[in-house]
Every structure is written in C-alpha cells, then in structure tokens.
Image (cartoon, rainbow, N blue to C red):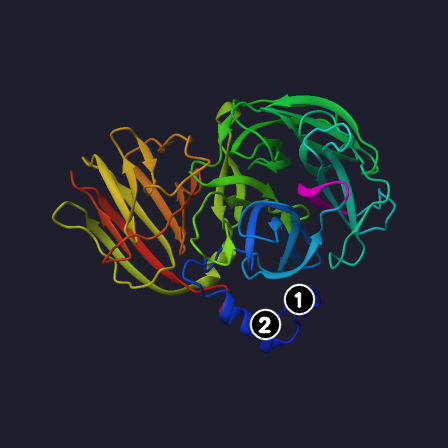
Amino acid sequence: MQRGNDFISQFLYCNDIPTWTRFLTEIYKELHRPQFHFTARQNWINDPNGLVYKDGIWHLFFQHNIEATVWGKMWWGHAVSDDLLHWKQVDHALYPDETGTMFSGSAVVDHNDTAGFGAGTILIFYTAAGMHADPIAPFTQCLAVSTDNGVSFTKFEGNPIVNWIEADNRDPKVSWHEASQQWVMALYLDADRYCLLTSTDALNWQKIQNLELLGDRECPDFFPLTDDTGREHWVFSGACGNYVLGTFDGINFEPLTPVKRMEHGTNGYAAQTWSNSPDSRKIQISWMASGLYPEMPFNQQLSIPVELGLKGYGENLHITRWPIREVESLRRSSFKTDRQIISKATPFYPETNAKLFDVEFKLTKKDAQYFYVVVRGQPLVFNFIENELNFRPSGQFKGLEDRKASPLPVGEHLKVRLLIDVTSLEVFLNDGEFSASFCYLPDGHIHPLSLQAYSGNPVVTDFVLHEMNSIWE
C-alpha cells in the first residue's frame, strides 16, 4: 500500500517502504484475514474508541489485548488513515497502569483551549477499569492529551476527572455543545441506565441527567444530526444499536421518538462516531462482534465506516446508514445485467471467481416466499412470509445470538446493497434505511455468489457486481 500523505509516515512503526511492504505481504494475506475491513496486525480487538479527525488524518483507536488473541487486559490500539479505508497501525496510545486496564472512551479536538493544554490539543477520555466497583480501585473516567497531533499521548496528572458513580460505570463519549459552549459526556452506568455530564473546561464535570435506553447497554454515543430542513436533532445510542432522537439544550435531553434500531444484524456492536469530521459528515464504525477467525494471528474485525443521515418527520424520523463514498475507490472490475427472473429452475450465478464484492440490485418480490443470496456457501435469507432477514450460519455466533431476526422494510420492491469481505457481510436496504452487519466463515460452494428462489419468480433488475481490491495491496 502506498498512500500520498507524508504526514502519516510519522506514525509508522517502520518508516521504510521495504519493511512496510513485507508487513503487508506476510501479515495481511492470511486465510481468514478481512481484505477491506480493519483488523489489527495481531491479537484481540473489540470496541472502536477515540474516533477523531485532525489535520487530514482519521484516527482510529480500539480496544486491544496485545498479549493474546482472546479478550483480556486492554490497551488502546491506534491506527491512522487519510481515506478511512487504508489504515496503518501505529504505536499503542494508552497502556494499562495502576488505575486499571484501559476501557473504552472517546476523543475530541479542543479548538478553543478550554482545558488549557493549547488550542488544537487532542483530548482522550477513557475508563480506567479498576477492580469492578471495588471502593479501593473503582472504575473511573480519565483524561489523556496529545499536543503533537496524535503521535503521542500523556495521561493527565489530575486523573480521575470523574470519580466512580456506581457499578462498572464506563465508556465516556464526549461531544461539544455549541449553543451552550460546553462539553457534554454520555456515560454508561448499569443495566440499561446512562447519564449525562457537562463541563466548560473538560476537567471538572457535573452530572445533569439520568437516562434509560431500553434494551441496550454500554458504549453510549451522543451527537447532533441535521435533517434536510437544517434542523438539529440529537442522537442518543447504545452498544446494541438502539437509539432515540430528541432535543438537547445543554441542560436537558428530551427524547422525541420511541426507541429505534440502527443495527439489525447479528454482529454489529459498540458503534461510535468520529468527532471533528470535515464537511459536517457524521461517520460511524462498529465492532463486528463474535466473528470467528480460527487459528489466525489476529482476532475480530471492525465494520466498514458508514455515513449517517436522517429521513422522515416527527416520530417517524429515523437514521440512515450508508457506506462511505470512499468505498467506491476499491472497485476493480464490474459485472452487470439488466433483468433476471429467479426461480427454482433458473438460479442466477454472476460471472466471478472473486471473494470481495460490492453488489447492488433491485428486487421485486412478486409471489416469492423466500429469496436467497448465497455467499460462499452461506445463505442470506429474505423471508417474505415472516417479512424478516436472516443470516445465521450454523454454530458461528456467540454472545449476540439472542438478537431476533430483522424485520424487512415494507413494500413490493427493495433496493439492495451488499458489501462482502472474506469473513463479513454488510447489508444495506432502501438507500440505508435498513442496515445489518454479519460475520461468517465460508462453507463448501461452487459459485462464490448466487441468487436463488425455490418458490415464485422474484425479479432482479439493475444488478451490478463490483469486484473489490484489498486495502493491503
């Protein structure tokens, strides 16, 4: 991989191209290594953390056990990119210390020098995970700062900035509230309970509100989104993909919608958004939890970054999620067909032997009871009888298997987009009004992709399959 931004080179473990090329050749070509989704060079990762953009560089931090391929003691891993796709893993940002292991959090750019470390300082907020609410070493919220554009971080001498509140309180997500000129922190407490805190200097915090998010837990996100009319709405979400939309005046968050879902898949978890993004883009990435990568030197992957938007009005206002436009730069060769009638006698086998795809088509249900997209031997099932979507390869999911099947959008027609990597499938329907993240391992197959129906005659139109390049090439 060769990227054009020289600024990135200062982050590299190894700055010489031959050594970096060797990393790409020897490390990123393993059997089950995702080829356009982020994975660590080796060992375990989970939640994305500290997502922040600064001076042309997207920073991706992540929960990382550097000692093993299973969950354990946590560091903050760190990767950088100039396009949200081609990542270079650099030195770890946060290390475990006497306050505990380094749990999840967030990052912001302090443009106005509110904290006193200098304008443009990157502030990292993280949980020091002590001994599980032990009064001697409880979970506390802490601060680290970078005055060199994210090359290095120093933990604040005055930590913790938020003392233990209750249980395993954790995962601080900090945003700037422009109208009240203050920072706001969303913090997980316990069960489905969260709270909001505010600060004018990012150092001294006051709790202002308790919140509940039914059916969710952990990893809050709290941020504004603007609808087509220019009106600002605030989003409060949790790790499982539930969210509510409402108003926030710097003192009180007022939910205006019922609890909705932005993640309908079996594997999407702990989604977080980048702060300080250019052009007011709201970009989100998730941990694709509980995927399997047998006997690989790495374990777990992140989703493709998606851009968030809003559609609808009133209680019907909802979030849309769509792959970032940069994904199109990975497209290689394309296969197109205008119209295919799918039946038991006439399955559709696109002309490809590749493993990496970006697929788009329109689907008309007609009298079909089921419609199948079979990905390297594993079936994605559009169940029109129950009006739900299923992708549950046998024996491959653990931890999130209690999620129910996803209700399909209502209507005779569906617009379908699929991003298919070596070990993951992401589904986007009707321009991002529905999205779902899944992990899989391939099964026996002849065709890497096929479209099938065993009842009725669903019609596929405007089918386009783009074979994709690896980000590690």
How far is mark 2 from mark 1, CA to CA? Answer: 9 Å
Looking at the rendering, the stretch of residues picked out in magenta corresponds to 98-110
Q: Looking at the image, do the residues carrying marks 2 and 1 touch, with CB atoms under 8 Å apart?
A: yes
The residue lying toward the viewer, choosing from 43 and 76, is 43
Picture coordinates of residue 97 (x, y %)?
75, 46
Q: Is residue 449 left or right of residue 18?
A: left
The residue lying toward the viewer, choosing from 407 and 437, is 437
- Is residue 109 located in the magenta-colored stretch of the structure? yes
Image quadrant in which you'd find residue 219: top right
- Is residue 373 located in the magenta-colored stretch of the structure? no
Q: Which residue reaches farthest bottom?
A: 18
Picture coordinates of residue 435 (x, y %)?
43, 40
Q: Mark 2 points at which residue?
A: 20
Name the kind of residue labelled 2 in the image.
Trp
Disc 1 secondary structure class: loop
The residue lying toward the viewer, choosing from 417 and 469, is 469
Label 1 packing within 10 angstroms: few (<14), some (14-19), many (20+): some
Picture coordinates of residue 201 (x, y %)?
84, 38
Disc 2 secondary structure class: helix
The main secondary structure of the magenta stretch is strand
Q: In this view, does 58 lie above or below 399?
A: below
- Give the mark nearer the N terminus: 2 vs 1: 1
Q: Is residue 38 left or right of residue 361?
A: right
Q: Which residue reaches farthest left?
A: 345
